[in-house]
């Protein structure tokens, strides 16, 4: 589609992207109070949007690290908030979005991307794969300190 634009979102467009993501998950729109809290998790230059000319797709990431075998710490892009507006799915919006986001990671020298997805099966074509099949979380509720959480992956 010739009128499609994929680009980094401006700060004033991030609320719309959050609303689009929630709608893609069939979740009620967020409140201003929720946005005040959520907006703090948005890192500059890491939120993407697809416009046709209105916003129809979004994804964001945040900077992280992963320790790999041997102990090296590698930069990691933790991808989240991926959504495409209802009625615009299966039209190349997600492909355009992921191509731009992954190219940006490569340009920045970020070798790893991690995605926690509600529909993981659709992301294999972009290079994502299953990292774990189950997770067990144990929270010590008897402590007065900040609870330590132990996670086990299988």
Image (cartoon, helix red, strand yellow):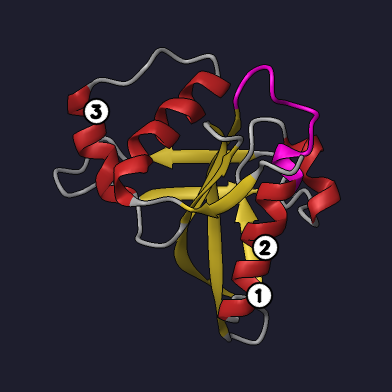
| Residue at image point 85% right, 49% down | 125
Residue where numbered disc 3 is placed: 34
Could one spot residue 64 in this view of the protein? yes
Mark 2 vs 3: CB contact within 8 A:
no
Distance from disc 1 to disc 3, alpha carbons, whole Å, reads 33 Å
Q: As drawn, which residue projects farthest toward the front?
A: 2
Residue where numbered disc 1 is placed: 106
- Mark sitting earlier along the chain (1/3): 3
Q: Position of residue 69 (x, y in %)?
A: 67, 80
| Residue at image point 36% right, 51% down | 10
Question: Within 10 Å of the Cα at label 1, are there few (<14), some (14-19), or many (20+) other Cα atoms?
Answer: few
Residue 32 is drawn in which quadrant? Answer: top left
Q: Position of residue 74 (x, y in %)?
A: 57, 79
- Mark sitting earlier along the chain (2/3): 3
| Residue at image point 76% right, 53% down | 128
Q: Where is residue 7 in the image (x, y as percent from the top left)?
A: 54, 54
Is disc 3 placed on a helix, strand or loop? helix
- Which numbered circle lies on residue 97? none
Q: Where is residue 96 in the image (x, y as percent from the top left)?
A: 72, 48
Question: Within 10 Å of the Cα at label 2, are there few (<14), some (14-19), or many (20+) other Cα atoms?
Answer: some
Q: Tell me the magenta residue range.
A: 85-95
Could one spot residue 154 in this view of the protein? no
Is disc 1 placed on a helix, strand or loop? helix
Nearer to us: label 2 or label 3? 2
Q: Which of these two is toward me, 143 or 85? A: 85
Distance from disc 2 to disc 1, alpha carbons, whole Å, reads 6 Å
Mark 2 vs 1: CB contact within 8 A:
yes
Q: Is residue 75 above or below residue 71?
A: above
Q: Which of these two is toward me, 150 or 87? A: 87
User: Does the magenta portion include 87?
Assistant: yes
| Residue at image point 56% right, 21% down | 25
Secondary structure character of the magenta stretch overall: loop
């Amino acid at each position: 589609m010739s009128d499609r634009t994929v680009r980094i979102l401006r700060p004033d467009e991030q609320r719309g992207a959050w609303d689009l993501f929630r709608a893609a998950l069939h979740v009620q729109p967020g409140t201003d109070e929720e946005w005040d809290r959520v907006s703090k998790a948005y890192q500059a230059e890491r939120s993407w949007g697809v416009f046709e000319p209105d916003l129809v797709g979004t994804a964001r990431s945040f900077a992280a690290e992963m320790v790999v075998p041997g102990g090296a710490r590698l930069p990691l892009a933790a991808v989240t908030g991926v959504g495409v507006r209802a009625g615009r799915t299966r039209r190349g919006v997600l492909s355009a979005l992921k191509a731009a986001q992954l190219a940006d990671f490569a340009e920045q020298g970020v070798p790893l991307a991690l995605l926690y997805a509600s529909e993981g099966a659709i992301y294999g074509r972009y290079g994502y794969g299953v990292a774990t099949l189950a997770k067990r979380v144990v929270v010590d509720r008897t402590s007065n300190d900040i609870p330590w959480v132990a996670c086990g992956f299988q």
